[in-house]
Amino acid sequence: MNTDRSKTFRMVMLAMMVAIGVVISPILRIEGMCPTAHLINIVCSVLLGPWYSLLCATLIGIIRMMFMGIPPLALTGAVFGAFLSGVFYRASHGKIICAVIGEIFGTGIIGSLVSYPVMAFFMGRSGLNAFFYTPMFLAATCMGGTIAYFFLKALSHTGMLAKFQQSLGAKVYDRKSNKSQTTDPSSTAADSLHH
């Protein structure tokens, strides 16, 4: 696929993921739990990679904070999992379950621990401890992760996942040889944001 067309498609897909993430974020949401955010993180990680997923989670968090009055949990509870989901997916050579595990570890553990000082010291919330948000974050990531897993597995079984990844210029994993292929062989670490 033409590289310029791939880049345009990536930008369109990123914009769509941000829009969908903002619109569906109120579903099942209580403070400290937003399962749909983790669904978006994992899908974006698998389709676009860790850097785009990080950017997507950051943009969704900022929009939610600005226009929906959501506390900084919108960022602390999303960005770590979004990035690690993509990293784990690539490190495992395309295992969807690893993308889910990356989200659970990044948000459920790292994100919840970072949320404590942000909410306690910067937002002035009292009665919190270091693990206050951990149970809620873990529950939310497991819910969103389960939905994302079955959704992506369904796409994989129909062959649509590989087609989407190829169209987006992302890495496509051949499950038989367990080797990754990319539509742009000249890519380097310097332009990893585009893969």
Image (cartoon, helix red, strand yellow):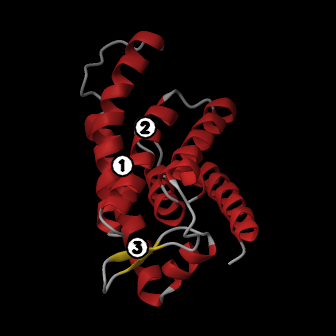
Of labels 2 and 3, earlier in sequence is: 2
Is 151 left or right of 62, judged from the image as shown? left
Asked which secondary structure carries label 3, the reply is: strand
Location of residue 120 (image quadrant): top left
Q: Quadrant of the N terminus?
A: bottom right
In front: label 1 or label 2: 2
Residue 52 drawn at (x, y percent): 56, 52
> How many neighbours does mark 3 have within 10 angstroms: few (below 14), some (14-19), or many (20 or more)?
few
Residue 195 in the image: x percent, y percent?
55, 60
Residue 140 shows which numbered tag? Answer: 1
2 vs 3, front mark: 3
Residue 99 sits above or below residue 106 on the image: below
Task: Answer with the quarter of the image where residue 99 lies.
Answer: bottom left
Instruction: Tell me the kind of residue under disc 3.
Output: Ser
**Which residue is identified by label 3?**
180
Image coordinates for residue 119, horizontal then vertical, percent = 42, 19
Q: Amino acid at mark 1?
A: Ala
Badge 1 element:
helix
Left or right? Give the position of 99 relative to 37: left
Q: Position of residue 83 (x, y in %)?
A: 44, 47
The label nearer to you, 3 versus 1, is 3
Residue topped by disc 2: 77
Residue kind at label 2, given as amino acid type? Gly
Q: Which disc, if any, is residue 103?
A: none
The reply to whether residue 95 is in sight is: yes
Say if 45 sits above or below 159 in the image: above
Q: Residue at 46% across / 58% down in the picture? A: 39
What residue lies at 56% left-to-right and 31% top-to-bottom?
A: 70
